[in-house]
C-alpha cells in the first residue's frame, strides 16, 4: 500500500524564495536607476551639441550671439526632446561668447552627480566627468 505523497511547498521554502528575491531587488533596482540616469545624460549632451551648432550658424548669419534666444520658436528650443532637461544661457550671450546650460528636470533631477551640463562657444564642456 502506497502512502499519498505531499504536493506543494512549505511556508519556510516560500519564505526563503521571497528573501532571495528581495535581496536581488535591493541590488538590481538601485543599479538600474543609476544606469538609467547616466544613460539619460546623452539627451542633454545631444541637445547641447545641437544648440551649439545652431548658435554657430546663427553667428555666421548675424555676426553676434547677443540676439540669440532660448524659447519656444526661438533660436534654440527650451527643453530636450523627452523633457528631461531644460536649456538656457548661463549668463546671457554677448556678441562673441555664450555658455549654454542643460538643467535636469522631472525624474532626471534625481541625477545628483550631473544636474547641470554646459558648453560654451569654444566647445569647452563642463563638468568633464559628465561628458
Image: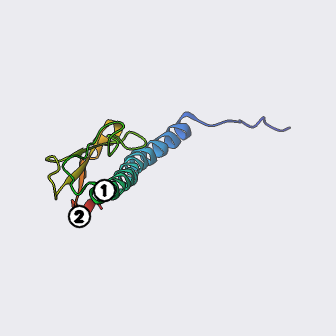
Q: On the picture, is 70 further left or further right than 10?
A: left
Name the residue beneath numbered marker 2.
Answer: 128
| Quadrant of res 26 | top left
Q: Position of residue 59 (x, y in %)?
A: 26, 57
Q: Which mark is residue 61?
A: 1
| Quadrant of res 95 | bottom left
Given this view, does label 2 or label 1 mark the residue nearer the observer? 1
Assign a secondary structure to mark 2.
Answer: helix
Front residue of this view, candidates 18 and 84: 84
What residue is rendered at 45% in x and 48% in y? 24
Mark 2 crowdedness (10 Å alpha carbons): few <14, some 14-19, many ≥20: few
Can you see residue 14? yes
Assign a secondary structure to mark 1.
Answer: helix
Can you see residue 113? no
Front residue of this view, candidates 22 and 75: 75
What residue is rendered at 67% in x and 36% in y? 8
Amino acid at each position: 500500500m502506497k502512502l499519498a505523497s505531499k504536493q506543494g511547498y512549505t511556508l519556510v521554502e516560500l519564505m526563503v524564495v521571497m528573501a532571495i528575491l528581495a535581496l536581488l531587488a535591493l541590488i538590481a533596482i538601485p543599479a538600474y536607476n543609476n544606469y538609467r540616469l547616466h544613460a539619460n545624460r546623452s539627451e542633454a549632451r545631444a541637445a547641447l551639441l545641437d544648440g551649439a551648432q545652431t548658435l554657430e550658424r546663427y553667428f555666421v548669419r548675424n555676426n553676434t550671439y547677443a540676439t540669440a534666444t532660448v524659447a519656444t520658436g526661438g533660436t534654440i528650443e527650451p527643453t530636450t526632446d523627452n523633457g528631461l532637461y531644460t536649456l538656457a544661457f548661463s549668463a546671457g550671450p554677448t556678441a562673441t561668447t555664450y555658455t549654454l546650460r542643460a538643467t535636469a528636470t522631472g525624474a532626471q533631477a534625481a541625477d545628483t552627480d550631473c544636474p547641470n551640463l554646459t558648453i560654451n562657444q569654444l566647445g569647452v564642456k563642463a563638468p568633464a566627468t559628465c561628458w
